[in-house]
Amino acid sequence: MTKRISDAVAATLHPLEVKVLRALKDVERCNEEQMLALSGLEAAQLRTAIGWLTSKQLVLVSDVSTQDFVLLTPLGERYAREGSIEEQILKLLNSRGEITLSELSTAVISVYAGESVSSEDVQRAVGALKVAACARILAGGVIQAVPGAHSEELQIRENLLRKLLEAGRIELSSLSAAEAQIVETGSKKRGKLNGLFRIEQKTHSRFALTPQGVETSVSAEKFGLTGDEIQEVTPEILASGAWRERGFRRFSLSLDPGRIVAGKYHPYRQYIDFLKSRFIALGFKEMVGSVVETEFWNMDSLFMPQFHSAREIHDVYFLKEPKSALEIPEPFLSNVAEIHRLGAKSGKRGWGYSFDRERTKRLILRSQTTALSSRTLASNPEVPSKYFAIARCFRYDQVDASHAPDFFQVEGIVVDDKATFKTLLGLLRIFAIEIAKAKEIKFVPAYFPFTEPSVEIHMKHPKLGWMELGGAGIFRPEVTEPLGVQSPVLAWGLGVDRMAMVALGVNDIRDLFSRDLDLLRRSRVCGRF
Amino acid sequence: MPTIQIQSSDLHRLLGQELTEDQLEKHLELVKGELKRNEEENERIKIELNDTNRPDTWSVEGIARQFRYALGGSRRPYAFFEGEAKYRVEVLSNVLPVRPIVGAFVVRDVTIDAEFLEQIIQTQEKLSENFGSKRRAVAIGVYNLGQIAFPVIYGASSPSSHRFVPLGEENTMDLQQILETHPKGVQYGDIVRGFSEYPLLKDSADTILSFPPIINSRSVGEVTTGSTDLFVEATGEDLQKITLALNILAYNFADRGGRIERVSVHYPKEHSYGDNIFPRRLSNEVALEHSLLEKLVGEQLASEEVIHRLRKYGCDVEHQGERYLVKTEEYRNDYLHSVDAAEDFLISAGFNSFQPEAPSSFTIGGIAESTSFVDYARGILVGFGFEEIFSNMLLSKEEVLDKSKLPNDLLEIDNVMSGSYGVVRNSILPCLLRVESGSAKVLYPHRLFEIGEVAFLDKTQPEGSRTEQHACLAIAHPRASFSELHSYLHYFLYYLGYEGTLTECETPWLIPGRTAEIGVNGKSIGIIGELHPEVLIGWDIKVPVAVAEIDLSKLMSA
């Protein structure tokens, strides 16, 4: 053991350990009595400290042997002082001649008030006297002493009781065979509460410092450790100022911390909080809305023709009850119906079909956040303004590693007379750098029914390679005109679930909504994505 | 969005040059295509095409055509939009109520090898499935020309009056049998099932060509390698769509070396359907203002550049002073607005050739008032030592009604995918109980919360429902009790600035005598109590659970 290590071990010794090391320092080896005297510890404290020190290999325990001692129980002590039940009975019989069993019981029990002596004990004692021919039972339950009778066994027991009362304890091996027999039958055993004797086993061993123990005790001495260092800083110690003299025990830093159950944000929710803070920093206002939408706001207002393939029952969830909204506000309904048929005023033509004004009222679970954008556009937004929403969307999909029953989309719009294709690219680049921490990005032509031009932004992930970050575009005039918006509107959406999976290191989208409390407790919520 | 499979050697043959995989990926941006997975063994390539308005890009011929413009290939003359029709199709009035539109053309002298045949079948399928709304709007048939005696007759027939051997069968079947037992009849039968007569295409010698839109006759309608002369028809509901589908096929056959001959379609005089000759012009053209293009792009552009880029994308451009008349070949019909031509310009120039510009307008950001409130509430609960849960909103009716014994004001999904996700949650309680149910082995105490949206049926609202923000708190451990949760609830409301009162009440999911309605300023905003053992047993939860659910939307306005 190097000095450095012995210093380190010494620094974190418990005060009890210090006391033992100090006690053992000047003796080659010693037994427990000596140790108690030298260290000033209680027996239990000594045993604890020895346990710690032997496991640290600082103290060696040797010459282990055991010794049995006989001691009196509290009842035994009472017998020794007041005499046994048998003696009491004989005394009563001798003084009163004849007496009934119940009178005898009452009289005897009153002698031992406070001890659990019962009438059964008295009966048993009477039985024993009868067997020893010291008493006899006459007709009518009257008990009478046998004059001049004498029980040797009773005599030996009385003597042993007195001897033990005087000595406190006697080694079992020093008793005579007859005495040992009495101890055996009269010992306090399981289920027999009224025993007179108990056996105590004493372990003897001898303790010595190991070479490491010697070095450690040298280190401890060097640090001036006495074992009286303060363990817990209590209000009393603070009040008394005792800490000024005593110094503090140094704590071990290598122990595992105990477990706690702590309040904690959910990791995915916290990631969404992070996203929100980024969009707010970039000047976007949050949009919120109902999870139940009409086909009108979810699709028709976005110039998706009613025959569009993404509008069938295998793509969106329809409500069972009620099936339709009460009404769609005007002039939006008429404007949208007309533009589907004929196209924009500034345009060439529409989809050329007759718009179904009942179908547009059908209620669905919001399938794209864009529904919130179209509602915002219809609410006469300021120019310039920027909006975003992180909202739950619902699609008819088999739930698997990449499809959750419902999922989040983040989406937004920029209503700005100065908005152009180049500012759209600029905005997307800011998102990629500020939010997804992208180093390399590229723009790819895309198709969305409601934007023209439409673009996808891809980013190069250090491990996963090129991945799609989101889609965007400039809203078609067929979307903005019927909602009363004259300015160009940039629209964008990012795959929030995918970004979260990358940021949180999750491979299965269902784990974003994990029900596993243990997993949640182990997950980190560092807030740096 | 269709995904097609092509062979790279076939693409290279159509292009007249080879492309590396990188070049291919780059050029696929021109058709909004995405390379899916290159199956090396048989050198087949999977490509997903994203533009629903450009079905011409859903075939290897169409992809090659769009690439050729960019690669500088010379434009080909496609001369099949002029001239007389050599062949006739007669339409009978009885088919008009069922499926009124038909169009057709003829291909001569084309060489069909195995790969081309596969591509014909694939294109036909993608056009009728994706573009033709699963054959309802467009269904296509291809036949051996030599076996047909013109004119071809398109009429309707009663379900049992005609029999023929359909593709994939050995014996003759009548139309009703085909509908009931043939796989295609089962798959597409709904399109015609409601009518008393079904469409039938036959020739003047009474030979049956097909039962549109279900199945071709095996004798005439089975094209094989080695076929050279074909009759191609499409039936449906919409003339523009039929025209576009046939034009795309005509261009594809022409690019394979076939000679396209025109077919005229004649309607009964008493009906308003006009006669047509196919292939027919769609006039996909739009006027594009130069200033509008510059405003949209965000920079000054030279006219020569605009014209050059559009031509490199296959557009005809006529410069008319301050604007351009932009026109495409007849396999496209996607110009609804000048912005569509503007996008062609941008794609041709390459999106990455434009310098991104940071938006310069100043706007003020902020979260919604309700979000702000929710976030404060979440912060308080985390401070109390509660762990946040975040759940899906869809769950099963059983979890809400049977297991949690909550009231049935649920919004149910009509077209459920799975019963496990059949309703929208009207309470957050089942979501927390689902977590608690699986957490018996996780170190106690469990103090859980979730704040989020729930939705209810409410017929007084325009959308028949309300979406609200609820907060749900649950405490689970061997000594969890009403009074412990009551303390948390009290301080939760206190920190949010409210004073809560409790009024005893009863609900099926909480223990009577330990259940209370939470009131704030005289409004009932939630409920607190100890979970009824019936509910605990239902969720297989082994410890007592105290819960409180608060309507934050109501609390905010209380």
Image: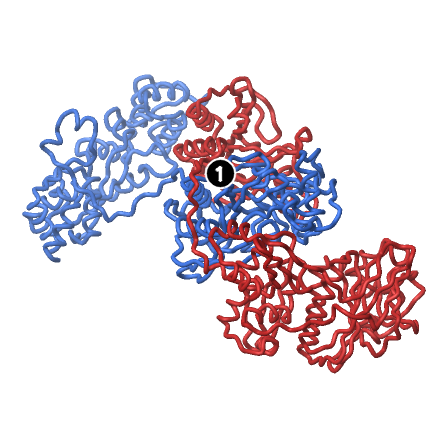
Closer-to-camera residue (B203/B212): B203
Residue at the image point whose x is 22% and y is 52% from the top: A55
Quadrant of the image containing the N terminus of chain A: bottom left
Query: How many marks can you see?
Result: 1
Is residue A383 at least partly visible in the picture?
yes
Three-letter residue code for mark 1 = Ser
Q: Chain for mark 1? A: A
How packed mark 1 is, by other alpha carbons closer than 10 Å (few <14, some 14-19, many 20 or more), is some
Give the farthest residue toward the bottom.
Answer: B226
Q: Which chain is blue?
A: A
Closer-to-camera residue (A44/A346): A346
Closer-to-camera residue (A157/B289): B289
Report which residue position mark 1 lands on: A385
| B31 vs A354: above or below | below
Closer-to-camera residue (B557/A41): B557
| B145 vs A154: above or below | below
Q: Position of residue A43 (x, y in %)?
A: 19, 39
What tint does the image give chain B? red
Is residue B435 at least partly visible in the picture?
no
Q: Position of residue B317 (x, y in %)?
A: 60, 62
The part of the image, by quadrant, that contains residue A335 is top right
Q: Position of residue A258 (x, y in %)?
A: 32, 43
Residue at the image point whose x is 54% and y is 41% from the top: A487
